[in-house]
Amino acid sequence: MKIIDVSKEDLDKIEMSDYFIEKSMEEEIDYIIDDYNESKVPYMQETWSIDLNRTIKDKRGNIIGGLKGYLYGWKCLYIELFWVKEEYRKKGCGSQLRGYY
C-alpha cells in the first residue's frame, strides 16, 4: 500500500473514474493512523493510547454517570461513550466528568 502526495495542480487533472472507494481493512486503518500520520506529525505522548474510563458517583457511591474513551497519539480525546443519569443532567455533572481530562 502506498499513499502518494499529489500537488494541487495535478489533483485538478485526476479523473475520479480512475479510482474507487471501498471499506477499509484493519491494516489500512492502522497504516493511515499509525504510519502515515506519525510520519507527518510525531506522537505527543509516551504511549500510543491511554485509556480514560471514568465514573462519577454520588456521596453514597452510586454511579450517576460515566465516560469511556482514550487519548491517542497526539493527545486527541476520543469519547466512545458518555452518559449521565437523567435526573443528574443539567446540573454540571457531565461537564465535571468531561472536564476531568
Image (cartoon, rainbow, N blue to C red):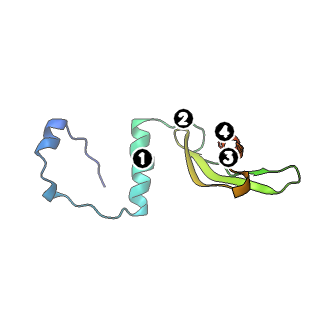
Distance (Cα) linking label 3 and label 2: 34 Å
Reading the chain from its start, which is encountered first: label 1 or label 2? 1
Distance (Cα) linking label 1 and label 2: 15 Å
Q: Secondary structure at mark 1?
A: helix
Mark 1 or 2: the one toward you: 2
x 87%, y 49%: residue = 59
Dot 3 amino acid type = Lys
Label at residue 99: 4
Reading the chain from its start, which is encountered first: label 4 or label 2? 2
Mark 3 or 2: the one toward you: 3
Q: Which residue is label 3 attached to?
A: 90
Dot 4 amino acid type = Gly
Label at residue 62: none
Q: Quadrant of the N terminus?
A: bottom left
x 39%, y 64%: residue = 25
Q: Which residue is label 2 attached to?
A: 44
Mark 3 or 4: the one toward you: 3
- Answer few, some or many: residues within 10 Å of disc 3's Cα (few below 14, many 20 plus, some between 14 and 19): few
Q: Secondary structure at mark 3?
A: loop
Corner quadrant of residue 86: bottom right
Reading the chain from its start, which is encountered first: label 3 or label 4? 3
x 66%, y 42%: residue = 95
Reading the chain from its start, which is encountered first: label 4 or label 1? 1
Q: Position of residue 76 (x, y in %)?
A: 53, 41
Label at residue 35: 1
**Residue 21 or residue 3, whichever sits in front:** 21
Compared to 20, does 6 lie above or below? above
**Residue 61 or residue 79, whichever sits in front:** 61
Distance (Cα) linking label 3 and label 4: 15 Å
- Answer few, some or many: residues within 10 Å of disc 2's Cα (few below 14, many 20 plus, some between 14 and 19): few
Q: Position of residue 13 (x, y in %)?
A: 10, 44
